[in-house]
């Protein structure tokens, strides 16, 4: 009887293990073929993997197991700074991009749990600069084009890893996400927190830079440390300064003493018109953020003004007829 139960238990364990890894097994051959197509070997230092694994689901199952398979087959890893993740909704297909810096070629693997696709692309800067590159792109690249192109070239250019983490969360690398990194750097340089102090960020108006600020300064709406306040065109016209970037609140234990710092961002210093080239042009400013970030005003603000700064003037539920 004991042998029978042990055998049954072992069978159950094996079945669960098989089910857990079934989907991951499906991509092993695609990864091998991808390396061959790129003329690369496991551990190639010019290879980078970008994927939405850990965010998406395949056949209703979470995809963290794919990460182990990717690391095993390619040698790319988080610790090696050449395994990057881009954020996607959980019902999105699994995407794995294998980019080789040496040739600027990229193999894209897409898998929705039923159908797999694999295709190689030339992502060289000259190729992506041509309008026809963006006009008609067959699967599996499709809507992920700018994400994969921008993150691949950001990694190839040696963009700092914490900026890449912001771009992962945001979904691509762009001038505004780089600007957010510059602003966050300025904040930590010029306004380092003292004991018992905390930051709150008011994104007004909100744009891509705010995702970098969330990640780098750990300020989120859920923690009530981040507020997004859109502005109308007429409200922007009323401002006495240009290029508003947001408001930083610095609070201590004494809530009656909160400092507000208003920022602007100097886009005029950036000359490139191409989004990717402009984003890369911002990188040298990470060590001298004061050349792009300007303080418009500093002021001590009382609690009643803080409440006005961080709450909507009109209850949004009112417009849905959900107020008394």
Image (cartoon, grey):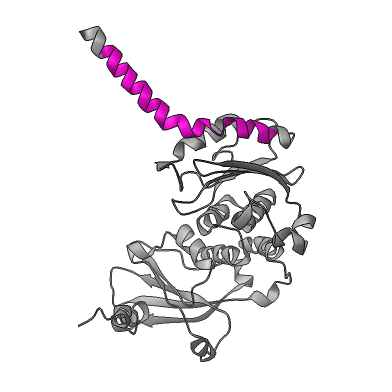
Q: Whole-percent x and y of residue 76?
A: 60, 36
Q: Whole-percent x and y of residue 319?
A: 32, 82
Was residue 266 drawn as part of the magenta stretch in this picture? no
The reply, left or right, for residue 2 in relation to residue 287 is: left
Q: Whole-percent x and y of residue 32?
A: 64, 31
The reply, left or right, for residue 124 in relation to residue 145 is: right
Q: Which of 207 and 1 lies nearest the eye of the viewer?
A: 1
For the point 49% across and 51% down, which residue is it? Answer: 92
| Rendered image quadrant of residue 321 | bottom left
Q: Whole-percent x and y of residue 299?
A: 42, 82
How many marks overall?
Answer: 0
Q: Is residue 206 above or below residue 36?
A: below
Q: Is residue 206 above or below residue 74?
A: below
Q: Residue 40, can we see it?
A: no
For the point 42% across and 26% down, which residue is it? Answer: 18
Q: Quadrant of the C terminus?
A: bottom left
Q: Residue 271, can we see it?
A: yes
| Rendered image quadrant of residue 126 | bottom right
Q: Quadrant of the N terminus?
A: top left
The reply, left or right, for residue 250 in relation to residue 235 is: left
For the point 70% across and 40% down, which residue is it? Answer: 46
Single out the residue that lies furthest toward the front. Answer: 114
For the point 32% across and 17% down, which residue is it? Answer: 10
The reply, left or right, for residue 247 in relation to residue 185 is: left
Magenta stretch mostly in which secondary structure? Answer: helix
Q: Which residues are magenta?
A: 6-35
Was residue 29 drawn as part of the magenta stretch in this picture? yes
Q: Which of 154 and 148 lies nearest the eye of the viewer?
A: 148
Q: Which of 148 and 266 lies nearest the eye of the viewer?
A: 148
């Amino acid at each position: 009887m004991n042998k029978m139960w042990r055998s049954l238990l072992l069978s159950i364990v094996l079945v669960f293990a098989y089910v857990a890894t079934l989907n991951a097994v499906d991509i092993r051959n695609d990864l091998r073929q991808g390396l061959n197509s790129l003329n690369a070997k496991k551990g190639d230092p010019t290879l980078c993997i970008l994927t939405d694994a850990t965010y998406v689901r395949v056949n209703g199952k979470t995809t963290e197991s794919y990460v182990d398979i990717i690391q095993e087959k390619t040698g790319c890893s988080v610790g090696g700074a050449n395994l990057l993740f881009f954020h996607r909704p959980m019902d999105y297909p699994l995407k794995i991009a294998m980019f080789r810096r040496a040739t600027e070629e990229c193999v894209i693997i897409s898998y929705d749990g039923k159908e797999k696709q694999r295709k190689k692309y030339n992502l060289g800067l000259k190729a992506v600069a041509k309008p026809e590159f963006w006009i008609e792109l067959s699967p599996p690249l499709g809507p992920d084009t700018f994400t994969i192109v921008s993150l691949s070239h950001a990694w190839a250019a040696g963009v700092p890893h914490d900026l890449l983490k912001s771009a992962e969360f945001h979904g691509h690398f762009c001038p505004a996400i780089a600007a957010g990194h510059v602003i966050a750097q300025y904040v930590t340089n010029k306004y380092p927190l003292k004991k018992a102090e905390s930051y709150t960020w008011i994104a007004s108006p909100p744009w891509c830079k705010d995702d970098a600020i969330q990640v780098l300064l750990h300020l989120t709406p859920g923690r009530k440390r981040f507020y997004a306040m859109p502005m109308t065109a007429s409200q922007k016209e009323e401002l006495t300064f240009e290029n508003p970037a947001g408001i930083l609140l610095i609070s201590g234990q004494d809530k009656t003493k909160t400092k507000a710092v208003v920022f602007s961002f100097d886009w005029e210093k950036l000359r490139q018109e191409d989004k990717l080239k402009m984003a890369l042009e911002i990188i040298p400013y990470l060590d001298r953020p004061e050349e792009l970030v300007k303080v418009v005003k500093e002021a001590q603000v009382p609690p009643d003004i803080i409440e006005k700064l961080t709450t909507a003037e009109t209850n949004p539920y009112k417009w849905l007829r959900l107020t008394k």
